[in-house]
Image: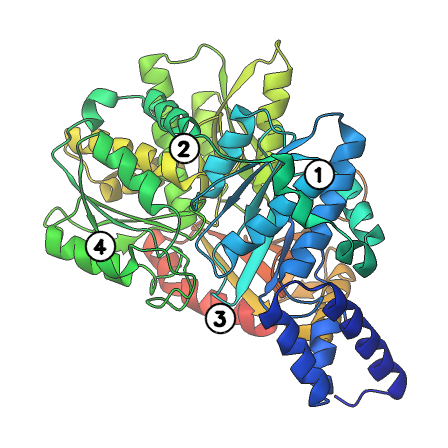
């Protein structure tokens, strides 16, 4: 793009301020070389904005510049967090974890040094640990806050920074708002002046005690509903950590139960480049190809996959009892199976006299509501983001007269939680719950596929379609805003994708029953439901299309599903 002289001077000024404060030579050289070559398009993309620290934390491409993930941006956000913590409590402390992504350990250490330089005590893991173990650890250590360096399931060029509060969930109002305000006040000069070298002499950075891990494992062990079916079960589990942090905890738990576990060797070791997959996401069929191939070879009873920070769980199951073919379940199917199993088990074993509560994101399948209704359980929809599920758990914990108890939390994007001691999605404990569920139905002569079919017969067949459109860079951001504004201009009775709008709910409005959010929900007279929302972590708009069989048979709907998806995707 052609920049004006004013734009060039502004970018150059920001670049020089960045260079004065950046501590990493590699990232500084990227910017210095762009300046030397007068590569204005490159410089503009690096500095036209700063990575946003918002309600979902901070995430971006690794590299030099304020629009990149690097030590400068980590130190900037951490300085803001330190200031907020110091004003919030007299003795602040922070637990820090990191996953296998490129520069994760370096970013974690940079954050620890900034906090300690401000007099904040830090519990820092010495090895990579997943999101759920950090959530558990900060509650165990009674930390004021927590940090995880991760970009979850994003491509390898990304990294990110998530902040948690003392309840174990990601920050919510007023804390997220307070931290964001502090970020805006932190200048390049103040980052440059942070005396990090003093930090270690203060003794404020301590290594996270290994007893925390043991406590986490014991918690999962105690959460088993039918431990006698799991321990030493004559089954085979095929597993891939997709080069991430799930390898140690998932295998530790399965080994503790004496379960034979086979692991994809090429994906076993941590590697932030994720060399064997296009995207380290267990939602992706390509990412699960190797573990499914291993499952076929070993005749595995269930297939598990976790993403780099082990908060997302993918599951594949045998199509038939001969275990020659496997079906990769969707997040909604996994959530449906787990919700059904946990509700049934709670009732049969009389595990809790209170009313079960299942909390799901509003973009997760509505079949769960129908299952909850049949058991007299509560089902609550919340905004996308597991911190909103964590809020519901905390609300019960804070209310001794609560009539409900938390049973299960789920998001369609492969996020599940079956234990209340963790306040984010947990692929480790959910993997163990899934193995228990499989063992139970196996003891009844049923496969998980057969149980899923029974659920559809009882509650009606539902299926969902998720697609997204990407919008990179400054031009893409403006286009996203224009698209959302155009969709907001529609009203009941208008036509969208050749369908008449029956109802429309804009969560950015008043009295919606949800916190304000950039989310639109449409239902159509033809029976479909569409939810539209910009991603909180990536430059894309996501579309969730809910389909029910209605007058059509299950087979007819399945046959038309791809055509309906294509129709909506092309029109939006």
Q: Earlier in the sequence, mark 2 or mark 4?
A: 4
Which residue appears at 88% of the width and 87% of the height? 5
Of the pair 216 and 102, the residue shown nearer to us: 102
How far apart marks 3 and 1 lie (CA) works out to 30 Å
Q: Quadrant of residue 484?
A: bottom right
How far apart marks 2 and 3 lie (CA) works out to 30 Å
Q: Earlier in the sequence, mark 1 or mark 4?
A: 4
In the picture of the structure, the residue carrying the numbered disc 2 is 339
Query: Would residue 566 be found to the left or right of residue 53 on screen?
Result: left
Q: Quadrant of residue 492?
A: bottom right
Q: Residues within 10 Å of mark 3 (few under 14, many from 20)?
A: few
Q: Earlier in the sequence, mark 3 or mark 1?
A: 1
Q: Earlier in the sequence, mark 4 or mark 3?
A: 4
Give the x, y percent position of residue 69: 62, 62
Q: Is disc 2 placed on a helix, strand or loop?
A: helix
- Residue 326's disc is 4
Badge 2 vs badge 4, beta-carbon distance below 8 Å: no
Give the x, y percent position of residue 23: 65, 62
Residue 67 seen in this snapshot: yes
In the picture of the structure, the residue carrying the numbered disc 1 is 514
Q: Is disc 3 placed on a helix, strand or loop?
A: helix
């Amino acid at each position: 793009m052609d920049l004006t002289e004013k734009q060039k001077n502004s970018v150059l000024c920001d670049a020089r301020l960045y260079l004065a404060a950046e501590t990493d030579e590699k990232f500084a050289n990227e910017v210095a070389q762009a300046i030397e070559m007068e590569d204005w398009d490159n410089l503009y993309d690096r500095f036209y904005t700063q990575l946003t620290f918002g309600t979902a934390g901070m995430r971006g491409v690794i590299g030099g510049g304020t629009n990149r993930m690097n030590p400068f941006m980590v130190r900037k956000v951490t300085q803001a967090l330190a200031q907020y913590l110091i004003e919030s409590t007299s003795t602040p402390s922070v637990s820090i974890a990191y996953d296998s992504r490129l520069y994760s350990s370096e970013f974690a250490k940079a954050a620890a040094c900034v906090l300690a330089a401000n007099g904040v005590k830090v519990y820092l893991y010495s090895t990579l640990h997943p999101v759920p173990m950090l959530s558990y650890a900060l509650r165990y250590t009674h930390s004021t806050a927590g940090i995880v360096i991760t970009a979850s399931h994003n491509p390898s060029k990304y990294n990110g920074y998530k902040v948690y509060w003392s309840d174990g969930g990601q920050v919510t109002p007023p804390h997220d708002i307070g931290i964001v305000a502090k970020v805006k006040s932190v200048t390049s000069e103040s980052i440059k002046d942070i005396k990090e070298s003093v930090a270690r002499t203060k003794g404020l950075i301590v290594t996270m005690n290994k007893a925390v891990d043991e406590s986490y494992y014991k918690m999962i062990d105690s959460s088993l509903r039918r431990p006698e079916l799991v321990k030493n079960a004559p089954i085979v589990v095929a597993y891939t950590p997709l080069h991430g942090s799930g390898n140690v905890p998932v295998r530790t738990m399965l080994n503790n139960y004496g379960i034979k576990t086979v692991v994809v060797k090429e994906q076993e070791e941590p590697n932030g480049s994720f060399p064997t997959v296009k995207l380290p996401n267990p939602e992706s069929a390509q990412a699960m190809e190797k573990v499914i191939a291993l499952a076929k070879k070993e005749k595995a009873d269930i297939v598990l996959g976790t993403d780099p920070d082990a908060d997302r769980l993918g599951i594949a199951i045998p199509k038939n009892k001969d275990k020659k073919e496997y079906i990769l379940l969707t997040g909604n199917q996994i959530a449906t199976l787990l919700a059904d199993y946990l509700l049934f088990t709670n009732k049969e074993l009389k595990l809790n006299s209170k009313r079960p509560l299942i909390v799901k994101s509003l973009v997760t399948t509505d079949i769960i509501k129908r299952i909850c209704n049949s058991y007299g359980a509560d089902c609550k929809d919340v905004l996308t983001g597991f911190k909103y599920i964590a809020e519901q758990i905390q609300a019960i914990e804070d209310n001794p007269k609560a009539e409900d108890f938390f049973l299960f939390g789920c998001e369609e994007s492969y996020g599940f939680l079956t234990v209340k001691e963790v306040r984010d999605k947990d692929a480790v404990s959910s993997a163990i719950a899934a193995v228990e569920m499989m063992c139970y139905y196996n003891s009844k002569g049923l496969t998980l596929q057969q149980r899923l079919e029974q659920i559809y017969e009882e509650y009606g067949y539902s299926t969902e379609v998720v697609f997204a459109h990407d919008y990179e860079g400054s031009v893409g951001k403006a286009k996203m805003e224009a698209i959302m504004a155009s969709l907001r201009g529609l009203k009941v009775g208008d036509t969208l994708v050749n369908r008449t709008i029956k109802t429309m709910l804009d969560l950015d409005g008043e009295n919606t029953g949800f916190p304000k959010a950039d989310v639109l929900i449409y239902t159509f007279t033809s029976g479909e439901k569409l939810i539209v929302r910009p991603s909180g972590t990536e430059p894309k708009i996501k579309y969730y299309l809910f389909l029910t069989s209605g007058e059509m048979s299950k087979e007819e709907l399945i046959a038309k599903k791809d055509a309906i998806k294509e129709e909506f995707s092309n029109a939006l």
